[in-house]
Amino acid sequence: MDLPFPEPTEPRESRAEVFLGYLDYFRSVLIDKLHGLSDSELRTSRLPSGWTPLALLKHLTYVELRWLVWGFEGEPIDQPWGDAPRGRWSTAENETVAGLIDALRDQAARSNQIVRDHELSDVGQPGERWAEAPPATLERVLFHLLQEYARHVGHLDIVRELIDGKTGE
């Protein structure tokens, strides 16, 4: 794993840096859990819901895109639900783990910059993302992203154990 767990006693410059430390950690764990899986294992579901490890990677990239770029920043996105074009997470045959990891890393850099450019109390831009509700603060968006990552990385931990017995954070 690239990053150690961000211990609660480890000093950080700000609450925003605490959020970013955990997001970076969960991204690292996600990528680590995908390493060593064959293309078939990345594209095969082990669960009745049908999601695959590769589709989960794509989903989490889009989660950041939807919440921070499309939602908080209010930038137009051509296909904000591109991870689930038919209502289910999916990947195309030509999408690779390397390409999707690169996309996650690119989105992570963009997400981290958005966080560093704002205060946690800043409110997102009004727009379609909020479905007529008032936009959330950056702090609420980040808290949502953290729970989303923690939950899905936990799901992937179980799937990885089913595939080859590998367990861990």
Image (cartoon, rainbow, N blue to C red):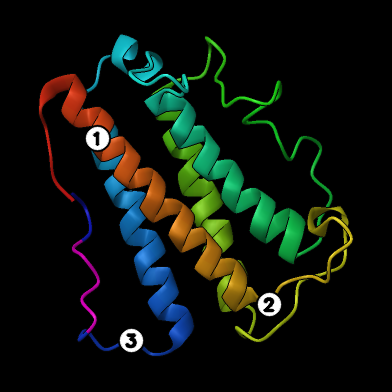
Question: Alpha carbon of mark 3 to alpha carbon of mark 2: how far?
Answer: 21 Å
Q: Is residue 14 above or below residue 98?
A: below
Question: Picture quarter containing residue 154?
Answer: top left
Question: Alpha carbon of mark 3 to alpha carbon of mark 1: how far?
Answer: 31 Å
The numbered mark, 3 or 1, whose residue comes first in the sequence reads: 3
The mark tally for this picture is: 3
- Identify the magenta region: 4-8
Q: Is 27 displayed left or right of 108 in the figure? A: left
Question: Alpha carbon of mark 1 to alpha carbon of mark 2: how far?
Answer: 32 Å
- Numbered tag placed on residue 137 in the rendering: 2
- Numbered tag placed on residue 158 in the rendering: 1
Which amino acid, by three-letter code, is at mark 3?
A: Arg
Q: What residue is pinned by disc 3?
A: 12
Q: Measured from the top left, where is residue 136 in percent x and y? A: 72, 72
The numbered mark, 1 or 2, whose residue comes first in the sequence reads: 2
| Nearer to me, 101 or 140 | 140
Question: Picture quarter containing residue 73?
Answer: bottom right
Q: What is the secondary structure assignment of the residue under circle 2? A: loop
Q: Measured from the top left, where is residue 100 in percent x and y? A: 47, 31
- Crowd band around label 3 with a 10 angstrom C-alpha radius: few (<14), some (14–19), many (20+): few
Which amino acid, by three-letter code, is at mark 2?
A: Thr
